[in-house]
Image (cartoon, rainbow, N blue to C red):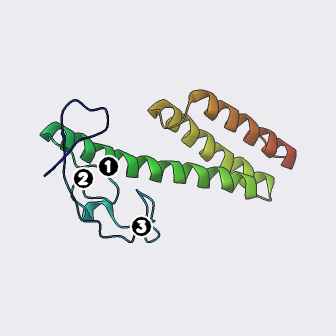
Amino acid sequence: MVSLKLKGAKYPVKARLQRLDTPVGLEYPYPASQPELAEYPAGQLPGEHVPNTKSAVKRQRQNLRRHSRNKAARSELKTAVKKVRSADEPQNATEAFRQAARMLDQAASKGLIHKNQAARSKERLAKHVQKLGGTI
């Protein structure tokens, strides 16, 4: 522990020093070669503060799990939308649209994206499918 006197602070602030295993200049939380989150204990990712209480450690652990889960879900969602956009036949576009619309609705209900964003995306995709000659 190191005590720091911050400008304008009434009392010294205790800060923990931590060793960073990544080269300087890489941005948190995803360096060029993305490490698995499980390899790092809570508070040890580059550029991350070290929690001081048990509840903060738990909250940080939960946030890392949720972040990785949400990132994967958003990626799947984008892939589903791209499949609709890249479909060249009306039948393929219609099938891809049904799957993407379902995923957009689920993402909106879980709070991953806003419900208006889901509605807007579905409307745009539906117009695209109709333009190709597919049915909705």
Whether residue 101 is visible: yes
Say whether marks 3 and 1 touch (CB < 8 Å): no
Q: Secondary structure at mark 2?
A: loop
Q: What is the three-letter code of the residue carrying label 2?
A: Gly
Mark on residue 43?
2
Q: Earlier in the sequence, mark 3 or mark 2?
A: 3
Q: What is the three-letter code of the residue carrying label 1?
A: Arg
Q: Secondary structure at mark 3?
A: loop
Disc 1/disc 2 C-alpha distance (Å): 13 Å
Crowding at dot 2, Cα within 10 Å, few <14 / some 14-19 / many 20+, comes out as: some
Q: Relative to residue 28, is residue 134 depicted above or below?
A: above
Mark on residue 73?
none
Quadrant for residue 79, please give it. bottom right
Disc 3/disc 1 C-alpha distance (Å): 15 Å
Q: Relative to residue 95, is residue 124 depicted above or below?
A: above
Front-most of residues 23 and 123: 23
Front-most of residues 19 and 80: 19
Q: Which residue was labeled with disc 1? A: 65
Q: Which residue was labeled with disc 3? A: 34
Q: Secondary structure at mark 1?
A: helix
Residue 96 at x, y percent in the picture: 66, 51
Crowding at dot 1, Cα within 10 Å, few <14 / some 14-19 / many 20+, comes out as: some
Crowding at dot 3, Cα within 10 Å, few <14 / some 14-19 / many 20+, comes out as: few
Residue 91 at x, y percent in the picture: 75, 53
Q: Relative to residue 120, is residue 26 depicted above or below?
A: below
Q: Relative to residue 94, is residue 19 depicted above or below?
A: below
Say whether marks 1 and 2 touch (CB < 8 Å): no
The nearer-to-camera label among 3 and 2 is: 2
